[in-house]
Amino acid sequence: MIDIHCHILPFLDDGASDWEAALAMAQDAHREGITSVIATPHHANGQYMNNAPKIKEAVELMNERLRQAGNPLLVLSGQEIRIYGDLLNDLERGELLSLADSRYILLEMPSSRVPRNMEEICHELIIQGFVPVIAHPERNAEIAADPSKLERLIELGSLGQVTAQSLAGVFGNKLQKLSLELCRRNAVHVLASDAHDSVHRPFGLNAAYVVMEKELGPEMRDYVRGNAQQIMTNGEVIHGKHVQTRGNRQKLFGFFFRKG
Ligand code: FE
């Protein structure tokens, strides 16, 4: 299993507070069956600045510590980039990182609104050959009020990344419902943990995939799980309908039952 968004690197943001915490998170990940994680420290969110060289160095140190601890987890570099004015210039200057050096780039909006220039930035990134991955759209107030605002970004060629705990219902019924609704609108392509620690915001990917299979069918679960791998290896994420409604699934099972 692959996780494309987590805050496992210590000392950079509100994720792991020190090496001990980072290694404990790595142990959780390994125990959960995660083989690789993309570390995505916050960048330019008004609180944290973590440019590309700083993250690359931390990733190297983290992997060294993991080898010493005998943990086979592989940590790759990434960045959770807040939408800001100089984003495109900084990308050109080599300040920004895509996910595992792929063409997929993780973008974060403020939680209260969709920035006015969001479509423009996504469009420009796509022209440059990148694929924007919209981090936790379910936590954005404007998208919650009007999911078509996310659909618009998806139509441009962006991907939607829902947080595992939102979908699993850990953050409450409202966020879970919205996460499932975004999936049904084909606006979700990948799940990620957005893990910050071992206790309050852990990885929790397995639990989310179980809910996903139950609510949306095994095809959707496999699609979303496969897309995490595609992103990490710079493969292709194919847009399309993968959600099976309960009615359809029951009909399908009924069909097999009658045949048997
Ligand atoms: Fe995050």
Image (cartoon, rainbow, N blue to C red):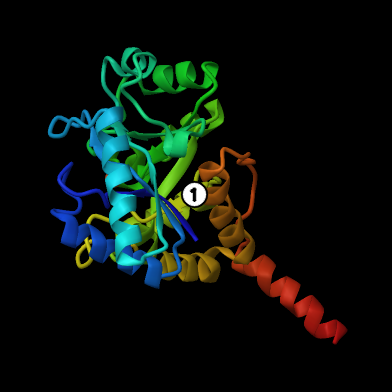
Q: Residue at x 51, y 50 (%)?
A: 228
Of residues 241 and 223, the one nearer the viewer is 223
Which residue lies under the disc numbered 1? 190
193, above or below 230, in the image = below
Left/right placement of residue 260 relative to residue 172 reads right
Give the residue type that dot 1 points to.
Val
Q: Residue at x 27, y 49 (%)?
A: 7
Q: Is residue 158 visible?
A: yes
Q: Residue furthest front?
A: 68
In which image quadrant can residue 42 be found?
Answer: top left
x and y percentages locating residue 28 in the rendered image: 32, 68
x and y percentages locating residue 24 in the rendered image: 24, 66
Q: How many marks?
A: 1
Q: Is the C terminus in the top left, top right, bottom left or bottom right quadrant?
A: bottom right
Q: Secondary structure at mark 1?
A: strand
Q: Is residue 171 visible?
A: no
Q: Residue at x 18, y 41 (%)?
A: 12
x and y percentages locating residue 135 in the rendered image: 37, 41
x and y percentages locating residue 105 in the rendered image: 43, 32
Q: Residue furthest bottom?
A: 260
In which image quadrant can residue 146 be found?
Answer: top left
